Image: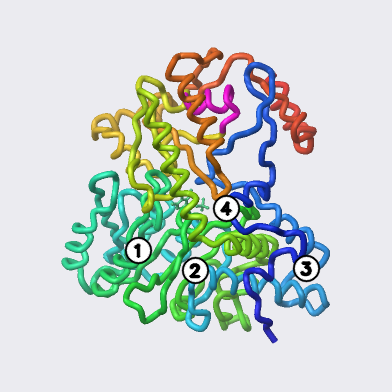
């Protein structure tokens, strides 16, 4: 019989004292790791690329270590370890469902590889025909745009001031296409501007128009409480997808939560072992969801790690995490706005309805150069470019259609040196003022022209490299670098 697991079931039973966001910092694996910088010294790494992937939490590692002696294939094994692992893996599904407020009787939690795979599954499984309509927005990550484009007609909702989704246009579109719109697919929080969409209002309007709402929660779930609301609530979220690697559990799992009956209908998009009840040479009976949608041997460790991370986040509380982040964002903008020559994109004043993403540029400096100097001279990890949301970034930068065509042509001829873009610093639940101070200090240096290195741009990738910066990676992580390919890469670099 299934036991009743709460998120805390996945936390170590002793030695854990986490109650505030500040406590989370010392629970981050690799916090303060020293990395080499251009002048030959080492500095504690300042990690401000959490929107891409977060570091792991220690209690997640401990949970995995404690689980590994019991690790076994799940669902069809008869040995004790397999029975235990099955129980734990199934409970991890329940933990994720509870985390987003899903009704376990009517919703399935499906473990896949990441948010991208989750969105592709819904798009593949929705039975969309080429003439069907999905409304998404121009601020989406490509993962919440291209899977829909592959299936049917897509309208991209525009954005208004500060890059917010144009809700008036949405209401007009839903009115116009009432009864014909199959899905509205929107990000819960933008990976560029950080803006949180009013997803429950959007759900209500979408339902009134006869459609379903898909929420890409890749950026929302690590930062805010997600509540799907009861199924019969007009503001109910029909589908939610998230990625564990953005939630301190980087073990290759994503979760898709959606109506059981949606997945009970039709054939799974990926087929093979595990998805069936019974197969004969001319007949297949599909298993029930989630098994029907998790083809092949599942990523058991990934699911357990995600549940453990949810346990930690729930211990602190998502509302406390959100409040910490809002205060830190306010601190960051107050500090960064004092530096002359910085242009910010998206909201910078009131940070309650945006997650911890800070996109910016420095006047007259290539975004890739700024990102390179931050890393190579400051030991600060950020990201630059278009962040898999090319249309939105180009819109925020005011790139004209002619310029866009020129950049596209250049890229196709192997030159990314002029690709437009931004620098993005992004916060995690464990980030603090010292991270922002380090970023601000380096940006001030860059603005003052106090860059020490000589940087050259690689036209093919658009990235900048500093002369003389050839760190010996094998000193820091010896494993793969002893392979012939690793040694060759290393000798080429030095
Ligand atoms: C808003 C948003 N959606 C989807 C994704 C895709 O997530 P994943 O790469 O985990 O599939 C990302 C990744 O950065 C994202 O920021």
Disc 4 and disc 1: Cα gap in Å? 25 Å
Give the mark toward the camera: 3 or 1.
1
On screen, residue 28 versus residue 53, left or right, reads right
Residue identified by numbered label 1:
199
Asked if disc 3 and disc 1 are in contact, CB closer than 8 Å, the reply is: no
**Residue 254 image point, x, y percent:** 56, 60
Dot 4 falls on a residue whose secondary structure is helix
**Most foreground residue, 278 or 385:** 385
Residue holding disc 3: 72
CA distance for labels 2 and 1 = 13 Å
Q: Residue furthest bottom?
A: 1
Residue at mark 2 to residue at mark 3: CA–CA distance: 28 Å
Local secondary structure at mark 1? helix
Disc number lying in front (4 or 3)? 4
Residue segment shown in magenta: 370-380
Give the residue displayed 53% in from the left and 23% down from the top: 373
User: Could you say which quadrant of the image residue 172 lies in?
Assistant: bottom left
Q: From this viewpoint, is residue 125 visible?
A: no
378 falls in the magenta region: yes
Residue tagged 4: 21
* Residue 144 image offset from top left, x and y in percent: 40, 55
């Amino acid at each position: 019989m299934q036991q009743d697991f709460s998120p805390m079931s996945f936390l170590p039973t002793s030695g854990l004292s986490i109650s505030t966001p500040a406590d989370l910092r010392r629970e981050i694996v690799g916090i303060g790791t020293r990395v080499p910088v251009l002048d030959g010294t080492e500095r504690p790494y300042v990690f401000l690329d959490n929107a891409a992937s977060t570091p792991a939490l220690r209690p997640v590692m401990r949970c995995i270590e404690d689980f590994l002696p019991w690790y076994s294939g799940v669902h069809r094994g008869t040995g004790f370890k397999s029975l235990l692992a099955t129980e734990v893996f199934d409970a991890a599904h329940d933990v994720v469902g509870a985390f987003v407020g899903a009704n376990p009787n009517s919703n399935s939690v499906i473990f896949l590889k990441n948010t991208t795979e989750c969105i592709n599954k819904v798009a593949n499984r929705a039975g969309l025909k080429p003439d069907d309509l999905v409304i998404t927005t121009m601020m989406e990550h490509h993962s919440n745009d291209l899977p829909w484009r592959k299936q049917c007609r897509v309208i991209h909702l525009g954005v208004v001031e500060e890059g917010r989704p144009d809700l008036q246009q949405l209401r007009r579109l839903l009115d116009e296409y009432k009864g014909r719109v199959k899905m509205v697919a929107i990000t819960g929080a933008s990976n560029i501007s950080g803006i949180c969409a009013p997803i429950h209002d959007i759900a209500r309007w979408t339902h009134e128009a006869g459609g379903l709402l898909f929420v890409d929660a890749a950026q929302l779930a690590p930062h805010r409480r997600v509540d799907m609301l009861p199924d019969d609530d007009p503001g109910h979220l029909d589908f939610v997808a998230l990625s564990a690697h953005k939630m301190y559990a980087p073990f290759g799992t994503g979760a898709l939560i959606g109506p059981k009956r949606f997945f009970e209908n039709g054939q799974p998009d990926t087929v093979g072992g595990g998805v069936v009840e019974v197969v004969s040479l001319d007949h297949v009976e599909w298993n029930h969801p989630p098994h029907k949608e998790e083809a092949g041997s599942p990523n058991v460790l990934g699911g357990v790690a995600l549940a453990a991370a949810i346990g930690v986040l729930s211990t602190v509380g998502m509302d406390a995490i959100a409040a910490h982040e809002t205060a830190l964002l306010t601190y960051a903008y107050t500090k960064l706005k004092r530096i002359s020559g910085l242009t910010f994109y998206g909201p910078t004043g009131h940070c309650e309805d945006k997650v911890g993403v800070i996109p910016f540029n420095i006047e007259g400096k290539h975004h890739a150069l700024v990102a390179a100097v931050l890393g190579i001279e400051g030991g600060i990890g950020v990201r630059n470019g278009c962040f898999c949301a090319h249309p939105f970034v180009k819109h925020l930068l005011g790139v004209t259609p002619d310029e866009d065509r020129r950049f596209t042509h250049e890229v196709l001829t192997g030159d990314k040196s002029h690709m437009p873009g931004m620098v993005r610093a992004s916060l995690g639940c464990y980030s603090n003022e010292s991270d922002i101070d380090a970023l601000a200090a380096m940006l001030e240096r860059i603005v003052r022209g106090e860059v020490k290195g000589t940087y050259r741009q690689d036209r093919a990738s658009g990235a900048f490299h500093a002369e003389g910066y050839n760190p010996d990676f094998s000193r820091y992580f010896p494993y793969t670098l002893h392979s012939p390919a690793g040694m060759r890469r290393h000798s080429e670099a030095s």
